[in-house]
Image (cartoon, rainbow, N blue to C red):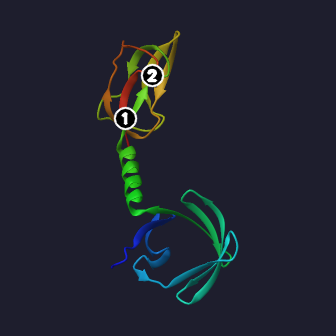
Amino acid sequence: MKTRNNRYIVLIEGKKIPVDVNKGSIQKIGKTQHEMSLERVDSDEFMVNIDGKQHSGEIIRLKQNKCIVAVNGNTYSFEITSESSHRRTRKIKEQAASAALKLTAPLPGKIMEVMVTPGQKVKKGEALLVLEAMKMQNEIQSPVNGTIKNLNVQAGSPVMKDHILMDIEVE
């Protein structure tokens, strides 16, 4: 009967390193086969034998899947995740990055002037429109760099608090 390896992803400074584990023992890191054993000395201290070389290690912090360890006096920070979880997280981040920002009215009022058009590129802090509220004119600025996807208001339009003024495709 063939034993199935579990594949994990170790993320170090955003770099993805695949790790194959069989029966709790690391078999392969990246594309390199390794012989490894791990012996617990006390609750947070370990002796690690990798390809015949002994290393002492200590778990400094372990919270969920994020780890900070010290090995031979050097400190390392990394994240451990399954391959499928890594793909899912990456997909969610990509979708969030490509999603449009819905810019909403901070308070009820009347749109006095719209300074942008759909398709126009805008920079963070650039004036998009003027909203009059309580007899004061408020310049609404872009919170991000992006492109105006669509406008939901025009000059003279009344708006309520949280009314979606426009969609901005974030760059």
Is there any visible trace of residue 16 in the rendered image? no
Q: Nearer the viewer, residue 4 or 55?
A: 4
To which residue does mark 1 refer? 168
Q: Nearer the viewer, residue 106 or 121?
A: 106
How many numbered discs sit on the rendered protein?
A: 2
Residue at 47% in and 84% down? 34
Determine whether the residue tagged by mark 1 lies in a helix, strand or loop: strand
Is there any visible trace of residue 119 in the rendered image? yes
Residue at 48% in and 23% down? 139
Determine whether the residue tagged by mark 2 lies in a helix, strand or loop: loop
To which residue does mark 2 refer? 162
Say few, some or many: other residues with alpha carbon within 10 Å of mark 2 (under 14 / 14 to 19 / 20 or more): few
Residue at 70% in and 73% down? 42
Q: Nearer the viewer, residue 73 or 42?
A: 42
Judged from this view, the residue extending furthest toward the bottom is 52
Q: Kindly report the distance in space between the C-alpha atoms of the residues bearing marks 2 and 1.
A: 15 Å
Judged from this view, the residue extending furthest toward the top is 135
Residue at 55% in and 82% down? 37
Amino acid at the residue labelled 1: Ile
In the rendered view, tell whether residue 144 sits above or below residue 23: above
Circles 2 and 1 in contact, beta carbons < 8 Å? no
